[in-house]
């Protein structure tokens, strides 16, 4: 489903609230569906497994160069990816979020820092914002996680949208997408991503227990050998604390 042609308006935006369970805080958009989470005592870590997998683009990036790179999130959620890229990886980080209530909630309840020279949170419709020329060719890690309050299907999921995402990326840039929903078709979404990026550029994880499938697409396809990926995964685990070696058991090219 794509809403690119009809940008959403303020009356359509749901109320934002949160709940705590033990040491975890959850973000909701007026329903029981979890839109994001945070470890209350470790607010800059990534708590959800699928969100950790959204960082798999690091497998295609030299660890020593990460802090020089630019990460962009389409959909802020609980700001887990935004905070991790900004605070843990020291990257330049841009997030695009249509709902100003979500931005406020992340500042107040989820420890999202204020904007500065490296952090920029843009209140805008992602389908409109990513068409602006100043963003094209500037993003090294692009994270796409765009769901409404019903969590039924991606809000933006057309071949045209993914082609615009492709235009955001640097030559070595990587996009990861969360595919989840009662009404969404994984295979159809995968085909749209492959149409925009080329089948050789697309990798995918197995689904999590909760049903989230993370798909990765490279601007320029590569096929690192397993030894190189294992070495890179070890660096990610030691530098970033993410379970990257486990990823390699669950992650492969789609063709």
Image: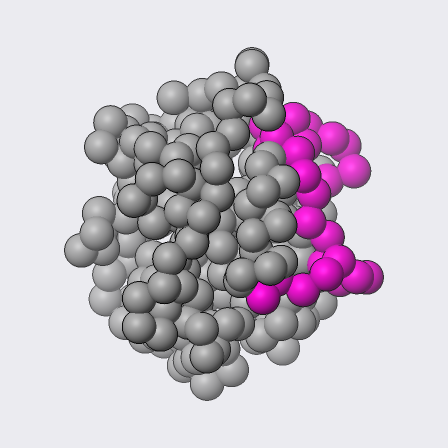
Give residue 163's quadrant in the image.
Answer: top right
Spot occupied by residue 31 in the image (x, y as percentages of width and height): 33, 40
Residue at 48 percent across and 43 percent down: it is 16
Spot occupied by residue 42 in the image (x, y as percentages of width and height): 47, 77
Judge by depth and name the residue closer to the eye, 105 or 67.
105
Q: Is residue 238 left or right of residue 10?
A: left
Which residue sits furthest top?
A: 5
Residues shaded magenta: 111-135
Which residue sits furthest left?
A: 209
Give residue 167's quadrant in the image.
Answer: top right
Q: Is residue 100 left or right of residue 12?
A: right
Residue at 63 percent across and 40 percent down: it is 100
Spot occupied by residue 172 in the image (x, y as percentages of width and height): 59, 53
Chosen colour scheme: one colour
Q: Quadrant of the C terminus?
A: top left
Q: Is residue 246 left or right of residue 237?
A: left
Give residue 254's quadrant in the image.
Answer: top left
Residue 216 seen in the current view: no
């Amino acid at each position: 489903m794509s809403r690119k042609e009809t940008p959403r308006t303020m009356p359509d935006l749901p109320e934002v609230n949160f709940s705590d369970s033990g040491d975890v805080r959850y973000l909701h958009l007026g329903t029981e569906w979890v839109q994001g989470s945070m470890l209350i005592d470790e607010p800059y870590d990534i708590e959800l497994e699928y969100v950790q997998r959204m960082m798999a683009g690091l497998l295609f990036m030299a660890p020593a160069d990460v802090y020089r790179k630019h990460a962009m999130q389409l959909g802020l959620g609980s700001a887990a990816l935004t905070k991790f890229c900004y605070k843990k990886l020291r990257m330049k980080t841009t997030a695009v979020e249509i709902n100003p209530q979500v931005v406020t909630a992340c500042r107040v309840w989820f420890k999202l820092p204020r904007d500065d020279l490296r952090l920029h949170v843009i209140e805008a419709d992602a389908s409109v914002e990513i068409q602006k020329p100043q963003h094209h060719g500037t993003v090294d890690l692009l994270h796409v996680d765009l769901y409404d309050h019903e969590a039924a299907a991606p809000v933006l999921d057309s071949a045209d949208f993914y082609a615009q995402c492709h235009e955001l990326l640097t030559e070595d840039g990587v996009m990861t997408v969360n595919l989840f929903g009662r009404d969404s078709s994984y295979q159809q979404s995968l085909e749209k991503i492959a149409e925009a990026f080329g089948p050789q550029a697309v990798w995918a994880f197995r689904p999590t227990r909760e049903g989230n499938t993370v798909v990765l697409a490279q601007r320029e396809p590569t096929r690192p050998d397993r030894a190189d990926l294992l070495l890179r995964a070890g660096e990610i685990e030691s530098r970033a604390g993410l379970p990257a070696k486990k990823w390699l058991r669950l992650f492969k090219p789609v063709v």
